[in-house]
Image: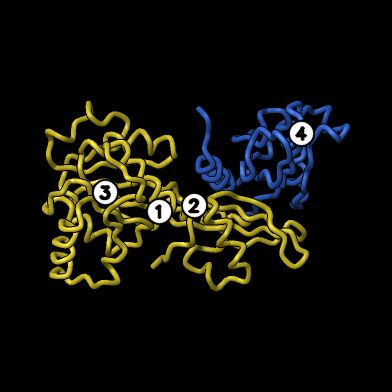
C-alpha cells in the first residue's frame, strides 16, 4: 500500500513520541522530470527505518544515510540530487530530473 | 521540527482545517500558520497564494527562502439528491480528485447500484450531516427539487463556511426558495452565496452537461479568487 502524507506525518509524530530519533525529509524543489512532487515526505528513524518517499526509490538510500547524521547532530541539511552532480548520479536519479531535499530532525 | 509543532499540524489536518508550515530554509526556524490567522501574518500574501494552489513550494521574500508546506484538507462535494445529474457528477468529480457524498432519504433513489464508489447516505440531511459536517473545503449542491430534503441541508450550508453552495431549479423555483429561506431568518447576504441557476452558463442540457457546468463552477470557487472564510 502506498502511504499518504497523513500516514507519514502521523508516523513521524508516533515515532518521536515513542522516544525514537526521527528525521523528516521533504522535497523542497524539483527541476525537470522529478519523480515525486514538491512537498513529498520521507520519515526516517535512528535505525534507518523509513516510510514515504522523496523519489521513485532512486535517492532514498542516500537520504536515509544523511538522516542518520541529522538525528545525531540535530542540524537540518539541504541535499541536492541530479544528473549534473557526479555523486548524485552515483546514487542514481536516472530520470534526468533534479531534486532538492530538506532533512530536519524532529525534536521532542 | 519541534514535536509539539508536528502534533499541532497533525491535529489540524485531522480536524479538516488548513495550515501552512513555514520553514526558513536558511536558519531552519519554523512556525505553523493556521488558516484563521493567515490574514494577519507577515507573509500573508505568499501564504494565501500558496494555500490556494493547494501545493507546497519554496518562496523568496526579502532575500530569504522559505519552504511553505501546505496542508489543505481534501476538498469534497456533498449533494442532496441521488438523481440523474448526481450519477453523472460522481464519476466526473472523481477524476477531479473531489470526494463525493450523496444524501437522499429516498431509498429507491439512493442505491449502491446507481452510485458505485461514492459515499451514499440514505438518510435525511440533518442526520447525515451530523456525521460529515460542512466546512470551508466542502461544496454543497442541492439537486432534489424537494424542499423537504434540500432546504435543511441548504440552511446548514448557509450557516457554515462552505466554499460553494449551488441549488438546482428555475428562477421561479429559486424565488420560492428564497422566500422560504427569508422566512427562516436568512438575509440577502446569506442567500446571495447560493449559485442559482446552478452551474456555469454553458448552455448545458443533458444531466452530464449540467454536472459539468456545476463542477466547472465548483473548481472556480476552489481555485479562483480567495473565498471568504468565516
Give the class, few, some or many, for how many residues have Cα within 10 Å of label 4's Cα (few <14, many ≥20): some
Chain letter for mark 2:
B
- Tell me if A6 is positioned left or right of B151 in this view: right
Mark 3 and mark 2 in contact? Answer it, CB < 8 Å.
no
Tell which of B160 and B191 is nearer to you.
B191
Point out residue B168 in the picture as x, y percentages from the top left corner.
Answer: 23, 50
- Choose mark 4 or mark 2, whichever is in front: 2
Q: Are the two marked residues, 1 and 2, in contact with CB atoms closer than 8 angstroms?
A: yes
Of helix, strand and loop, which one carries label 1? Answer: loop
The reply to whether discs 1 and 4 touch (Cβ–Cβ < 8 Å) is no
Residue identifier under label 3: B131
- Residue assigned mark 1: B137
Q: Which residue is mark 4?
A: A62
First reached walking from the N terminus: tag 1 or tag 2: 2
At 62% across and 71% down in the image, what residue appears? B42
Q: Colour of chain B?
A: yellow
Q: Quadrant of the N terminus of chain B?
A: bottom right
Residue B155: image x %, image y %?
22, 61
Closer to the N terminus: mark 3 or mark 1?
A: 3
Amino acid at each position: 500500500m502506498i502511504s499518504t502524507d497523513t500516514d507519514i506525518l502521523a508516523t513521524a509524530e508516533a515515532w518521536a513520541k515513542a522516544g525514537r530519533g526521527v528525521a523528516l525529509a521533504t522535497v523542497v524543489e524539483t527541476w525537470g522530470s522529478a519523480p515525486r512532487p514538491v512537498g513529498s515526505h520521507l520519515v526516517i528513524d535512528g535505525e534507518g527505518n523509513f516510510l514515504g518517499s522523496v523519489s521513485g526509490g532512486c535517492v532514498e538510500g542516500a537520504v536515509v544515510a544523511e538522516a542518520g547524521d541529522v538525528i545525531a547532530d540535530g542540524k537540518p541539511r539541504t541535499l541536492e540530487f541530479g544528473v549534473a552532480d557526479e555523486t548524485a548520479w552515483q546514487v542514481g536519479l536516472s530520470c534526468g530530473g533534479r531534486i532538492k531535499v530538506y532533512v530536519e530532525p524532529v525534536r521532542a | 521540527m519541534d514535536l509539539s509543532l508536528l502534533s499541532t499540524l497533525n491535529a489540524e489536518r485531522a480536524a479538516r482545517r488548513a495550515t501552512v508550515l513555514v520553514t526558513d530554509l536558511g536558519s531552519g526556524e519554523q512556525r505553523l500558520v493556521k488558516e484563521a490567522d493567515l490574514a494577519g501574518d507577515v507573509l500573508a500574501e505568499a501564504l494565501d497564494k500558496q494555500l490556494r494552489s493547494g501545493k507546497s513550494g519554496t518562496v523568496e521574500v526579502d532575500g530569504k527562502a522559505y519552504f511553505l508546506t501546505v496542508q489543505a484538507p481534501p476538498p469534497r462535494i456533498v449533494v442532496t439528491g441521488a438523481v440523474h445529474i448526481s450519477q453523472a457528477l460522481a464519476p466526473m468529480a472523481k477524476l477531479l480528485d473531489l470526494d463525493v457524498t450523496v444524501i437522499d432519504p429516498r431509498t429507491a433513489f439512493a442505491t449502491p447500484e446507481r452510485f458505485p464508489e461514492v459515499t451514499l447516505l440514505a438518510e435525511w440531511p440533518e442526520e447525515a450531516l451530523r456525521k460529515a459536517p460542512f466546512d470551508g473545503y466542502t461544496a454543497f449542491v442541492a439537486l432534489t427539487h424537494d424542499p423537504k430534503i434540500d432546504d435543511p441541508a441548504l440552511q446548514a450550508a448557509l450557516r457554515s463556511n462552505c466554499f460553494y453552495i449551488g441549488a438546482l431549479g428555475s428562477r421561479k423555483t429559486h424565488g420560492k426558495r428564497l422566500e422560504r429561506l427569508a422566512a427562516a431568518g436568512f438575509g440577502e447576504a446569506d442567500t446571495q452565496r447560493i449559485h442559482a441557476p446552478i452551474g456555469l452558463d454553458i448552455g448545458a442540457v443533458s444531466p452530464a452537461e449540467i454536472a459539468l457546468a456545476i463542477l466547472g463552477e465548483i473548481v472556480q470557487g476552489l481555485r479562483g479568487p480567495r473565498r471568504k472564510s468565516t
